[in-house]
Image (spheres, rainbow, N blue to C red):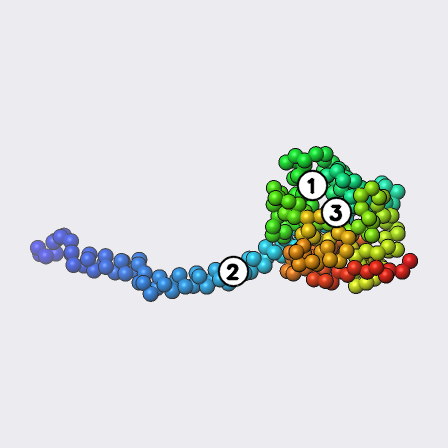
Amino acid sequence: MSELFDRRPNRTGRTEACNSLARLAGFTLVELLVVIGIIALLISILLPVMGRARKSAQTVACASNMRQLGFAFNMYVNESKGYLPNQKSGAVWPTDYWYNKLQPYLNRKQVNGLTPNNLDLSYNGVFRCPGKVNWNIDGPSDVQRISYAMSRFSNPGSGNPGRRWVKITKVAEFVFYKTTDKTKIALVVECNSGNMDVLNWSAIYDPTVQALWHNKADNVLFCDGHVEPCRYKQLQWDLTLPN
């Protein structure tokens, strides 16, 4: 009877139970290494996918910027008797540059003078390609600040009026697949030269200034307002367009 009422703990049994729980709660070294290996494998698979997704998002955002610029150009032309803004009507930055001429049509104020806020208005937001790898609003030069450049349309530059929209197809300019169709004439291109305007083919494809920020291609705003990517040397410079 004394054994039936013996309530002393069974130390041996408790020790065995604790050992069993410890074995269940812990990992062996091999199991831990396997888990680490699986995590490393998943990371190696996901990182390139995430990188491609980020670059794709940058391409879409850049195209959206260019479409907004296209709308602004269209409104400017409608209010300027059919004339595009000159890419650079004078030597005063930023007052005389096409960026500044479009500001009111982008719900942004025009700027005058070199201040941090004016730098942001002129080079950031819709005027910045998110894929520009060397972008830095603090410079040290415009090479780091400028993302987009307007075609000169054979315009010599400062002091000359902008081209008339309806006459664009009758001057030498950037064309796509050498066609005079206005839908295939480039208006704004991506450029890494530090200039807000481009005169010829070499100004965007010279190795020292080419952009190619979107899977080895550049987004291009065409004169009809649509945007599409162009690969290296796909955008041609044609001096023989018919009148």
Q: Residue at x 51, y 60 (%)?
A: 46
Q: Earlier in the sequence, mark 3 or mark 2?
A: 2
Q: Judge the density around disc 1: few (<14), some (14-19), many (≥20) Cα neighbours within 10 Å.
A: many
Q: Give the vertical position of 200 relative to 79 (above or below).
A: below
Give the image location of residue 176, x and y in percent: 78, 60
Q: Earlier in the sequence, mark 2 or mark 1?
A: 2
Give the image location of residue 173, x and y in percent: 81, 56
Give the image location of residue 196, x and y in percent: 73, 47
Q: Nearer the viewer, mark 1 or mark 3?
A: 1
**Mark 1 secondary-structure assignment:** helix
Q: Amino acid at mark 2?
A: Leu
Q: Amino acid at mark 1?
A: Ser
The residue labelled by disc 3 is 69
The residue labelled by disc 2 is 46
Q: Residue at x 68, y 48 (%)?
A: 194
Q: Quadrant of the N terminus?
A: bottom left
Q: Amino acid at mark 3?
A: Leu
State yes or no: discs 2 and 1 in contact (Cβ < 8 Å).
no
**Mark 3 secondary-structure assignment:** helix
Q: Nearer the viewer, mark 3 or mark 2?
A: 3
Q: Give the vertical position of 103 relative to 17 (above or below).
A: above
